[in-house]
Image (cartoon, grey):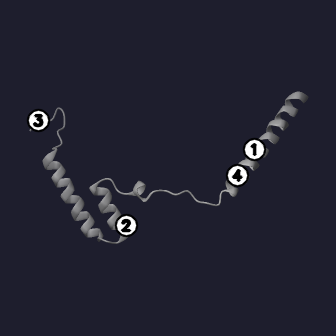
Amino acid sequence: MLILSLLILVLAAACVLAVRGVRADASAEAEPLAVPEALFAPESLEGVLCAQLMDGEITRRQYVRSMAGIAARDEERHPLTVPGYDD
């Protein structure tokens, strides 16, 4: 029981020292990470519309109208068919 208690104390001390070392390494880095702007660029028409809405370039009504147009175009190009349902 004594050996187990000592082992737990040693492991706890090692964890505390490791965390302090990680924090010291993290605080030593003064230069922030450079993230390319292209990483956050929208990759679809819906993403472009959402970005425009968030930036205030278009109104909510324009966004809804554009999304409805996209949905209508998608329905025309790729109609949804439900298996087992015949007209």
Q: Secondary structure at mark 2?
A: helix
Horizontal side of 70 relative to 16 (left or right) equals left
Q: Earlier in the sequence, mark 3 or mark 4?
A: 4
Q: Quadrant of the C terminus?
A: top left
- Residue 67 lies left or right of residue 47; in this view the side is left
Q: Does the residue at mark 3 contact the one at mark 4 (Cβ under 8 Å)?
A: no
Q: Residue furthest right?
A: 2
Mark 2–mark 4 distance (CA, rounded to whole Å): 37 Å
Of residues 43 and 87, which is closer to you in this image?
Answer: 43
Distance, label 1 to label 4, CA atoms, is: 11 Å
Residue 21 located left or right of residue 84: right
Q: Earlier in the sequence, mark 1 or mark 3?
A: 1
Q: Secondary structure at mark 1?
A: helix
Q: Nearer the viewer, mark 3 or mark 2?
A: 2
Label 2 sits on residue: 54
Q: Earlier in the sequence, mark 1 or mark 4?
A: 1
Specify whether residue 1 is in view. no
Judging by the rendered image, the residue that carries numbered circle 1 is 18
Q: CA distance from mark 3 to mark 4?
A: 66 Å
How far apart are the alpha carbons under marks 1 and 3? 66 Å
Instruction: Indicate the position of residue 49 as horizontal and vertical percent values.
Output: 29, 62
Q: Label 4 belongs to which residue?
A: 25
The Cα atoms of the two marked residues, 3 and 2, are separated by 42 Å
Given residues 4 and 44, the one toward you in this image is 44
| Residue topped by disc 3 | 86
Q: Tell me the amino acid under the disc marked 1.
A: Ala
Q: Amino acid at mark 3?
A: Asp
Query: What percent of the width, then of the height, locates residue 80?
Result: 18, 42
Nearest to N terminus: mark 3 or mark 2: 2
Q: Amino acid at mark 2?
A: Met
